Image (cartoon, grey):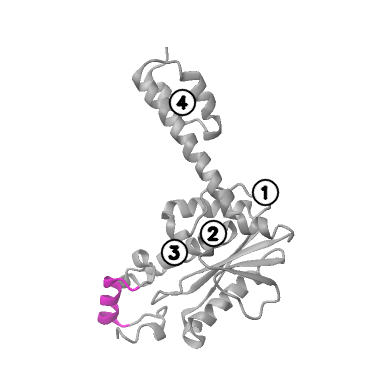
Amino acid sequence: MQSINEIKEILKNTDVTALSEFIKHYNTDERSGVKKLVLKAEKEIEAYNKEVARTENLKFFENKYSDYNYICGIDEVGRGPLAGPVVAGAVILPKDCDILYINDSKKLTASKREELFQIIMEKAVSAKTALVSPQYIDKVNILQATYEAMRKAIATLNVQPDILLNDAVNIPLVNIKQVPIIKGDAKSISIGAASIIAKVTRDAMMVEYDKIYPEYDFASNKGYGSAKHIEALKKYGPCPIHRRSFIHNFI
């Protein structure tokens, strides 16, 4: 007879799609430890089915505009920080997209975002990010800089989108049909994917900037106005990646 630890290890290594077979195999085992493992497997199936249903709901807009061949989600990260670029993401997912756990990037852990980043980049028809520098933000203002980052991301896609699903905005100077969706990163799987790749890209950049300008704690605050960041600004003044138009209250 298998030990409970052996069965526990089997459960650990069983894909969620095969858990029903695990349950069927061990359901008659009367040991309390095995019963707990079977219950755990049942809960994992329930959570998986719930996530599948949530993901299908996230495809509402993609299904609504399914007559278009290439549906592109657009989102940005970094409008609010005192330092660093604004980064836009543009993602065209396949029509039969089966990626689970996509959501507004702010609702995901850093490790989950990084895991999903790899999956999105692998499975997307095309997925690109583009950035606009702090200097450009100061020159034209953050809204116009955000539009520019979005236009750049769209322009670098491997295929031309037929329709854009945007997080809340209409992008000027883009001759593609656009659908602005309020809180779109939590309502559209394409926009959610765009928010994830944009955030992972920008966060990684800010970690690298932290090595160059360690006094501002960029690895932790990602350029946002944390207490430590503002304290460093007052003590050391701005560094080359600070947005001068954002920091006049602190220097």
The Cα atoms of the two marked residues, 1 and 2, are separated by 17 Å
Q: Earlier in the sequence, mark 2 or mark 3?
A: 2
Indicate whether 251 appears above or below 231: below
Q: Earlier in the sequence, mark 4 or mark 1?
A: 4
State which mark lies toward you, 1 or 3. 1
The Cα atoms of the two marked residues, 2 and 3, are separated by 23 Å
State which mark lies toward you, 1 or 2. 2
Magenta stretch in the rendered image: 225-237
Tell me the kind of residue under disc 4: Ile
Q: Using a 10 Å C-alpha cutoff, classify the residue at mark 3 as few (fewer than 14 neighbours), some (14 to 19) or many (20 or more).
A: many
Residue at image coords 65%, 67%: 164
Tell me the kind of residue under disc 1: Asp
Residue under label 3: 203
Residue under label 4: 10
Q: Are marks 4 and 3 in contact (CB under 8 Å)?
A: no
> Is residue 212 a member of the stretch shown in magenta?
no
Indicate whether 37 appears above or below 152: above
Location of the N terminus (image quadrant): top left
Tell me the kind of residue under disc 2: Lys
Tag shown at residue 96 = 1
Where is residue 146 drawn, in percent x and y?
Answer: 53, 76
Residue at image coords 50%, 40%: 48
State which mark lies toward you, 4 or 3. 4
Q: Quadrant of residue 170?
A: bottom right
Where is residue 225 drawn, in percent x and y?
Answer: 33, 74
Residue under label 2: 187
Image position of 234 (left or right of 154): left
Residue at image coords 50%, 19%: 25
